[in-house]
């Protein structure tokens, strides 16, 4: 998709975020953006940090860089996929927890797993995790009740065993495995799918003069296009900023965005590439 028609006065910026940092790129430097991330051709050997490979765009091989890495940030999609892996571990942990409880009931072995839902690894994560995503928060809210119920089974069923009702305890646990545990695992599945669907890197094709592709950046998200006044742009404190910035711009809501200087960013990336090539072992 092209954004060039939006560039009426040269003072518009496409905004995006990396973690808590807000950035902007002048629309006049954007030829188009696409979802061709999977088409990037990766090259072997020692490469500059942030360099991903090349993309065939308009019959030209264009160098592609990871924006977050190039600016010294973690990639958001890595955090999302790490969370997906953690959730898979939490699912297995609760299956194992229930199996351990059943083993304790049937064999008389001591049950040593966490009974407090806030003290298991998942509970510690769940009650400390924060998100501004209302859809994710809504899914997370559905976990608390079945998670607390599963953990409450330990005291209830072990008390039944102590009262000579082991067979009844086993029968009750099997019902909970088919109901409460299944709801918990299914909700965690839904959360994993939600997180995976949030991973859709966008390739931004950039231009210097408005016609030819200069280089491309991969973003984990894009925001709105905002107008800004270059005359009122806030200057960068050069002593404190190591990022390749033009200055700070604001949207109507008052949010401040760091406007990238693509000339400085490209110079920085080119320098890193040259250093990587110089340090690469001879073939």
Image: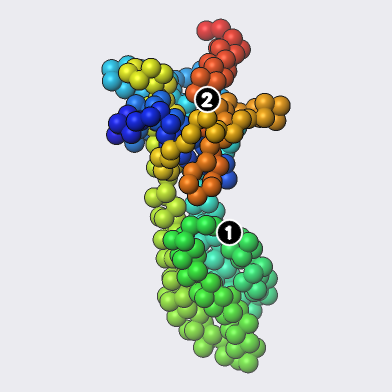
Left or right for 263, reference 236 = left
What SS does tag 2 mark? loop
* Most distant residue in the top direction: 282
Residue 197 position within the rendered picture, expressed as x and y whole percent measured from the top left: 39, 50
Residue 4 position within the rendered picture, expressed as x and y whole percent measured from the top left: 32, 29
Q: Is residue 9 or residue 200 the one in the foreground?
A: 9
Left or right for 45, reference 179 = right
**Residue 67 visible in the snapshot:** no
Figure quadrant of residue 115: bottom right
**Which residue corresponds to mark 2?**
261
**Which residue corresponds to mark 1?**
130
**Residue 212 visible in the snapshot:** yes
What SS does tag 1 mark? loop
Q: Is residue 225 or residue 194 the one in the foreground?
A: 225
Q: Dot 1: few (<14), some (14–19), or many (≥20) neighbours within 10 Å?
A: few
Q: Earlier in the sequence, mark 2 or mark 1?
A: 1
């Amino acid at each position: 998709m092209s954004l060039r028609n939006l560039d009426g006065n040269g003072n518009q910026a496409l905004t995006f975020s990396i973690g808590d940092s807000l950035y902007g790129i002048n629309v006049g430097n954007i030829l188009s953006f696409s979802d061709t991330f999977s088409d990037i051709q990766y090259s072997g050997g020692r490469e500059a940090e942030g360099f991903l490979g090349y993309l065939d765009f308009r019959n030209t091989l264009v160098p592609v860089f990871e924006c977050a890495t190039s600016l010294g940030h973690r990639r958001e999609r890595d955090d999302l996929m790490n969370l997906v892996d953690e959730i898979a571990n939490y699912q297995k942990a609760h299956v194992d927890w229930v199996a351990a409880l059943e083993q304790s009931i049937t064999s008389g072995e001591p049950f040593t797993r966490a009974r407090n839902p806030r003290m298991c690894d998942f509970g510690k994560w769940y009650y400390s995790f924060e998100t501004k995503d209302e859809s994710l928060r809504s899914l997370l809210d559905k976990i608390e009740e079945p998670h607390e119920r599963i953990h409450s089974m330990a005291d209830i069923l072990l008390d039944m065993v102590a009262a000579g009702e082991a067979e009844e305890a086993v029968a009750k646990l099997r019902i909970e495995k088919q109901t409460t545990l299944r709801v918990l695992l299914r909700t965690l599945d839904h959360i994993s799918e939600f997180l995976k669907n949030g991973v859709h890197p966008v390739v931004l094709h950039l231009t210097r003069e408005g016609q030819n592709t200069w280089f491309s950046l991969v973003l984990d998200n894009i925001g709105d296009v905002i107008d800004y006044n270059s005359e009122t742009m806030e200057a960068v404190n050069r002593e404190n900023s190591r990022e390749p910035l033009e200055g700070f711009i604001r949207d109507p809501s008052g949010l401040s965005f760091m406007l990238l200087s693509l000339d400085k960013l490209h110079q920085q990336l080119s320098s890193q590439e040259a250093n990587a090539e110089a340090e690469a072992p001879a073939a």
